[in-house]
Image: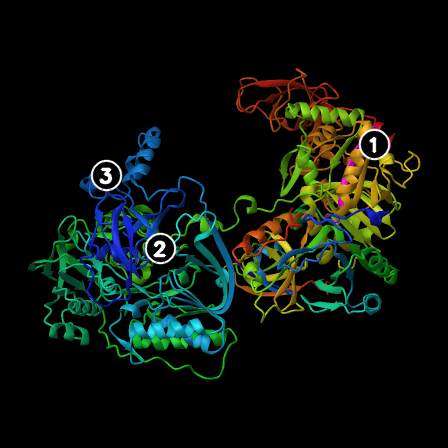
């Protein structure tokens, strides 16, 4: 296919590098240097999509990120990307581009019936109409979602890997147009570390299409020269194809770099996009400005294009976006477009200028070229259906000036600074009457320069950019004493614009006039919103969906501000703009996730015995970030059978548990005992070295925070065990008290959780197993009694052995250095084989402790449970203060109807109650039923041959034996049970003392 | 993202830190001497200031020191950081 | 007898007399001595005692290190240091320090089995780390002699600038080591780096 609209010469495309991609399956011929949009235009493709709501035909409007129409779907299958802008996507040979939002084809779109029905679908239509009858909403929603497609999500997991990079610099320059290039050059001149980003494929911005000369070079050549200079400069990073999409507090800037690849389907490669997280010391904001559209009837027809974009396509891409043009403007810049078109051989049939006496240099030059200029005139109507065919002109007072045939209608309503990034981080802006737009105010390390600062003239933008670059570098602490040279440009002065919001008189009643092309928001929709009382710009946005498209209303919002102001008879400055939020342009979710996916989504922490557990066929459960052995099913065993076997092995013989995940904190110093006295509820100073004690830790609100055993290693050293999930919070809590409240206490805390692995040996034969594995520690009951610890060797490895028990059985918790823990584990398993040693996991651990009525913090407790509530009131010292003590006498803490820990035994011994099940007295017809409490733990106890449960029941302890009912979670049944003492097995605790 | 100026390690990103609310709420020397209302005031009541706010931060992923940050709760501007007196 | 029990590193290395030293650009440095030291830097007696044992002074400037033969002292906090020794000498060094500091308010704790070091060296070092570390590690900022505790991807890590190759030692806790190694492997692949086969965890 030829490129009928490609100009014979000029442009920055590489005519020696032709390439081909497809659009809806049709081959499109292009050159390297083209965007998808410029190639489509060169090939005569004007229709690129259907509008979101009314499915009206739409064409390319701009040559940049502000385009409301040019959203396309790229790629296919797992790699497809919706919502890519044809105007910033580089044309490459592997691209498969499709339209979005039309079915079955662009040309014959079934949904365009909505366009015919448009008068009946005003703003708010869905809210008002489709809510009745309410039960039909799911049906409506299904239909609407199908109709309102914004492209398609991939249908399989994304095979690509996306990269994330952190970066730092003295000066980040956003935008590589004239001001940005000048700023980067000035900053680099000082030796500063500079990052220069631009969303386009090559730096230069408006210079790449400029008629002007800079430092006696054509604009594009000057841009090339500066780019080459910056590329060679040490400390400068140049990032083309990169959009700064978010500016956050502390001036953190997120960039999305599009990685252009010619290799399709390279699975697993770093592909697609890279997100940069830049923390610059200073920012030069050189993001330019967006040309504003103008209102007239059918202003959405394909062929209606921003005047500046026409210049870009002509001069930069050597594409004529039409064959006969009309221009409509309220400022001088469209005259430059007229000259560009004339140069390219495209006749300009008329220029309608809102101003009554346009007499600047550019208008004069256009007139001199013979271009018909109509002062004080407007376009009132665009004729044509699939594409504009004529522009109907009239004077400001409505007098007809006739329809002028054209297939290209260039519009320019002035320029609105692209202050989005600045505003995202709540940077202040103010109304600039010369621009009729909001412009950012400098501050907080942000230096606006060029068009974004309202400086539309080239020479001034270059000067301002240079100054901003120097100032930013100086503010970052860089300076070399010499002033950089300011580039000189030969552009001519421009006359002021004349704001043009509402067409005058009855022209404002013509339909449809689109304010937001992407969201199909019309002038009538804005009127309706205001009429219904939604006057705040934020309310207008929500009522009409103004600016809610993936284009973020870049063109629509600056126009809407003026239109609303005029409709309300208010000052535009008081109308404001809707709040700007990241992302400036769509960023794919894969790029945001980076490599934090799959196995790298979050750390998986494992113990030194992990490989052994895996080889033994363990099932695992996640406990926070830890992966813990849950149970060890033998071939053919269910979880229930495996857990029952493991439980009975511990009760009757011996089991071995990997308990390395417990937190362990060494507490050292002369005041260590005093410190423990303050943070634990019970007394510690008199604990003798070599002994262990169970402790409860409360928050200042008196609620249980953590529990565990602490041993006194020697006179000035203790070792505290914390629960697995509280290891880090407990250490932080203890450090906070030490550092902020009690700096006088001479105590040091050091986490040793990872140095010491913990192997629990439990069951009546555990003493024999430990002896068989080889130890120099005397194990006889009286030599090594319950709640003591000994240091020595186990299986040839130095060990701390604690005779403590979480199962109620004779038990040893053996701490060994983690680098030899696997050896000790294997030695114990080998030594235990004659005794029937059985590895057991966390599930069996839970059953065994529940049989003994031992609480688990976070299971029996939930941050609202006092020690007395769980029957541990005996651990509260009366002789000293401790954290949380005062709260235990607050009225709420001594309420008689507090929930208390009890056991529950079901009538049916085979019935295992649901954990979390609500408990009531009796399931009568009364609603709501008064709650008595909830089940906290529930298991089948193999050693008792029946189910057991722990529950928190109001006033439960005084009423042991009462009849209660527990609700099932998923069906409407009530399970009868009786309350009982929460220790189900060996209530005297004899077994752990043997 | 807030850059928190650790008095020892310099400015670091906020995900290295733990936040613990308003500073300058000393633990009463003799809790038993307080009425329930006074104790509840210490436990639960916070000023929630608009503007300058002194608050406790810990450089959890760094030097593990607790310190005080002064922050404007309207603008999130960090106005300064200071150490606890005796924590050297 | 304990000497005959081989140690296992978190990344799968097994200590033996013949263990080859890795000179690759990405490898674990297993079985180093890691001691945590706490003392009051205003306590001249304690400082002097430590100096006598180590032969080097403790760094008192935040985020710096001091180094001697086979030994490095790393600032962790205003009263906290990590001592990294090249050979596995934890028992002797621990005992010497405890003896020297006996009777004083100080703490020496062996953490050798609880953490490990991953060394990243060569021209891609900073590019790899920039994938997951938010700190500015530019040579003008993070020079040999500097250290920093921070986050690497989603794990806490201690970074030590070793030389200007650049070489950076990454100290991580044992249970996080497989995650950090997998993350580094993934980030480094783009630069053609990978762990040696002995780090197979």
Instruction: Provide the residue span drawn in magenta.
Output: A754-768
Pointer 3 local density, CA inside 10 Å: few below 14, some 14–19, many at least 20: many
Instruction: Give yes or no for residue A319 being in the magenta stretch.
Output: no
- Select label 3 or label 2 by which is in front: 3
Does any portion of residue B61 appear in the rendered image? Answer: no
Does any portion of residue A415 appear in the rendered image? Answer: yes
Upstream in sequence: badge 1 or badge 2 = 2
Does A614 sit left or right of A231 as displayed? Answer: right
Measure how far apart labels 1 and 2 are at the Cα level: 71 Å
Q: Are marks 1 and 2 in contact (CB under 8 Å)?
A: no
A322 or B31, nearer to the observer? A322
A585 or A901, nearer to the observer? A585
| C149 shown above or below B32 | below
Where residue C101 appears, as percent x and y from the top left, is 85, 62
Furthest toward the bottom, the residue is A482
Instruction: Give yes or no for residue A760 being in the magenta stretch.
Output: yes
Q: Residue at x 57, y 63 (%)?
A: C126
Say which mark, if any, is on residue A111: 3
Measure how far apart labels 3 and 2 are at the Cα level: 30 Å
Say which mark, if any, is on residue A47: none
- Select label 1 or label 2 by which is in front: 1
Furthest toward the top, the residue is A908
Upstream in sequence: badge 3 or badge 2 = 3
Where residue C80 appears, as percent x and y from the top left, is 74, 61
Quadrant in which the C terminus of chain A is drawn = top right
Residue behind mark 1: A766
Secondary element under disc 3, as helix, strand or loop, is helix
């Amino acid at each position: 296919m030829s490129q009928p609209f490609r100009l014979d010469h000029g442009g920055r495309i590489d005519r020696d590098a032709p390439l081909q991609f497809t659009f809806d399956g049709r081959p499109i011929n292009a050159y390297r240097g083209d965007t998808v949009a410029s190639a489509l235009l060169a090939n005569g493709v004007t229709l690129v999509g259907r509008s979101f709501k009314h499915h009206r035909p739409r064409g390319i409007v701009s040559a940049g990120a502000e385009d409301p129409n040019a959203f396309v779907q790229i790629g296919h299958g797992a790699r497809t990307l919706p919502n890519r802008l044809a105007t910033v996507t580089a044309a490459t040979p592997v691209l498969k581009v499709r339209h979005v939002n039309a079915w079955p084809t662009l040309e014959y779109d079934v949904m365009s019936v909505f366009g015919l029905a448009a008068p009946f679908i005003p703003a708010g239509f869905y809210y008002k109409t489709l809510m009745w009858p309410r039960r039909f909403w799911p049906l409506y929603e299904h239909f609407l979602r199908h109709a309102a497609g914004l492209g398609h999500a991939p249908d399989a997991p994304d095979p690509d890997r996306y990269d994330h990079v952190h970066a730092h610099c003295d000066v980040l320059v956003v935008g590589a147009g004239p001001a940005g290039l000048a700023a980067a050059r000035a900053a680099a001149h000082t030796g500063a570390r500079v990052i220069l980003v631009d969303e386009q494929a090559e730096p230069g911005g408006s210079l790449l299409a400029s008629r002007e000369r800079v430092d006696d070079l054509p604009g594009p050549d000057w841009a090339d020269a500066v780019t080459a200079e910056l590329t060679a400069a040490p400390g400068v990073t140049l990032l083309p194809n990169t959009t700064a999409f978010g500016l956050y507090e502390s001036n953190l800037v997120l960039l999305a770099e599009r990685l252009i690849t010619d290799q399709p389907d390279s699975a697993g490669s770093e592909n697609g996009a890279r997100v940069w997280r830049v923390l610059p010391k200073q920012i030069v904001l050189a993001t330019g400005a967006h040309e504003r559209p103008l209102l007239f009837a059918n202003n959405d027809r394909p062929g209606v294009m921003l005047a500046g974009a026409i210049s870009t396509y002509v001069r930069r891409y050597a594409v004529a976006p039409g064959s006969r043009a009309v221009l409509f403007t309220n400022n001088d810049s469209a005259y430059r477009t007229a000259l560009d078109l004339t140069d390219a051989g495209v006749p300009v049939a008329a220029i309608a200028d809102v101003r009554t006496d346009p007499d600047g240099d550019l208008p004069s030059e256009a007139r001199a070229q013979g271009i018909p200029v109509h002062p004080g005139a407007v376009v009132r109507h665009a004729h044509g259906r699939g594409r504009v065919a004529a522009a109907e002109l009239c004077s400001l007072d409505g007098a007809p000036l006739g329809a002028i045939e054209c297939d290209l209608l260039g519009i320019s309503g002035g320029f609105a600074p692209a202050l989005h990034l600045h505003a995202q981080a709540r940077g202040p802006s103010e109304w600039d009457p010369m621009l009729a737009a909001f412009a950012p105010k400098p501050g907080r390390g942000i230096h606006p320069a060029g068009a974004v600062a309202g400086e539309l003239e080239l020479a001034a933008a270059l000067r301002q950019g240079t100054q901003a670059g120097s100032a930013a570098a100086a503010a970052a602490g860089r300076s070399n004493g010499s002033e950089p040279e300011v580039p000189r440009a030969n552009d001519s002065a421009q006359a002021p614009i004349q704001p043009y919001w509402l067409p005058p008189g009855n022209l404002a009643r013509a339909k449809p006039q689109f304010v937001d092309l992407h969201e199909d928001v019309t002038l009538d929709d804005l009127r309706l919103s205001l009429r219904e009382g939604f006057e705040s710009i934020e309310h207008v946005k929500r009522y009409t969906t103004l600016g809610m498209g993936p284009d973020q209303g870049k063109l629509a919002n600056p126009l809407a501000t003026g239109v609303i102001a005029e409709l309300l008879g208010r000052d535009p400055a008081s109308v404001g703009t809707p709040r700007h939020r990241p992302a400036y342009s769509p960023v794919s979710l894969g790029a945001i996730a980076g490599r934090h996916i799959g196995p790298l989504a979050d750390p998986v922490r494992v113990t030194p015995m992990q490989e052994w557990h895996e080889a033994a066929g363990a099932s695992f459960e996640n406990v926070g970030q830890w992966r813990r052995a849950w149970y060890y099913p033998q071939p053919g065993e269910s979880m229930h059978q495996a857990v029952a076997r493991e439980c009975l092995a511990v009760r009757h013989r011996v089991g071995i548990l990997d308990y390395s995940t417990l937190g362990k904190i060494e507490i050292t110093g002369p005041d260590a005992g005093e410190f423990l006295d303050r943070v634990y509820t019970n007394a510690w100073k008199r604990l003798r070295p070599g002994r262990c004690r169970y402790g409860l830790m409360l928050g200042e609100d008196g609620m249980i925070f953590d529990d565990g055993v602490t041993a006194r290693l020697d006179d000035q050293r203790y070792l505290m065990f914390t629960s697995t999930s509280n290891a880090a919070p407990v250490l932080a809590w203890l450090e906070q008290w030490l550092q902020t409240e009690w700096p006088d206490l001479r105590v040091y805390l050091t986490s040793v959780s990872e140095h010491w692995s913990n192997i629990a040996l439990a069951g009546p034969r555990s003493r024999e197993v430990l002896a068989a594995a080889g130890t120099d520690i005397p194990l006889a009951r009286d030599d090594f009694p319950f709640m003591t610890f000994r240091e020595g060797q186990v299986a040839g490895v130095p060990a701390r052995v604690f005779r403590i028990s979480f199962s109620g059985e004779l038990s040893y918790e053996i701490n060994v250095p983690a680098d030899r823990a696997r050896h000790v584990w294997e030695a114990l398993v080998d030594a235990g084989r004659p005794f029937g040693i059985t590895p057991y996991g966390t599930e069996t651990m839970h059953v065994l402790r529940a049989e003994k009525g031992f609480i688990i913090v976070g299971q029996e407790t939930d941050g609202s449970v006092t020690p007395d509530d769980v029957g541990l009131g005996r651990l509260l010292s009366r002789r000293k203060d401790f954290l949380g003590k005062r709260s235990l006498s607050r009225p709420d803490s001594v309420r008689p109807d507090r929930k208390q820990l009890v056991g529950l035994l079901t009538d049916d011994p085979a019935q295992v109650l649901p954990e979390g099940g609500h408990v009531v007295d009796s399931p009568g017809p009364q609603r709501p039923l008064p709650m008595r409490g909830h089940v906290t733990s529930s298991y089948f106890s193999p050693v008792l041959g029946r189910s057991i449960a722990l529950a928190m029941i109001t006033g439960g302890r005084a009423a042991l034996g009462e009849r209660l009912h527990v609700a099932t979670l998923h069906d409407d049944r009530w399970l009868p049970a009786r309350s009982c003492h929460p220790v189900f097995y060996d209530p005297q605790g004899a077994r752990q003392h043997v | 993202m807030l850059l928190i100026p650790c008095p020892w390690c310099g400015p670091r990103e906020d995900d290295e830190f733990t936040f613990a609310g308003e500073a300058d709420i000393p633990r009463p020397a003799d809790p038993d001497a307080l009425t329930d209302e006074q104790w509840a005031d210490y436990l639960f009541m916070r000023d929630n200031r608009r503007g300058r706010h002194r608050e406790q931060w810990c450089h959890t992923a760094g030097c593990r020191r607790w310190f005080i940050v002064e922050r404007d709760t309207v603008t999130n501007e960090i106005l300064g950081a200071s150490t606890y007196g005796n924590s050297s | 007898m304990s000497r005959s029990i081989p140690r296992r590193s978190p990344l799968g290395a097994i200590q033996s007399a013949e263990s080859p030293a890795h000179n690759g650009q990405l490898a674990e440095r297993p079985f180093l001595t890691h001691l945590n030291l706490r003392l009051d830097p205003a306590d001249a007696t304690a400082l002097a005692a430590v100096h006598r044992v180590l032969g080097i002074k403790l760094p008192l400037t935040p985020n710096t290190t001091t180094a001697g033969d086979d030994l490095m002292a790393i600032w962790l906090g205003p009263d906290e240091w990590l001592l990294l020794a090249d050979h596995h000498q934890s028992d002797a060094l621990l005992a010497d320090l405890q003896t020297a500091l006996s009777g004083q308010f100080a703490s020496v704790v062996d953490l050798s089995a609880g953490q490990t070091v991953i060394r990243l060296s060569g021209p891609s070092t900073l590019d790899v780390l920039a994938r997951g570390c938010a700190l500015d590690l530019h040579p003008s900022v993070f020079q040999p002699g500097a250290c920093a505790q921070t986050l690497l991807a989603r794990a806490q890590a201690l970074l030590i600038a070793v030389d200007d190759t650049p070489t950076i030692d990454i100290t991580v806790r044992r249970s996080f080591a497989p995650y950090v190694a997998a993350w580094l492997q993934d980030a480094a692949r783009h630069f053609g780096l990978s762990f040696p086969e002995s780090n197979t965890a």
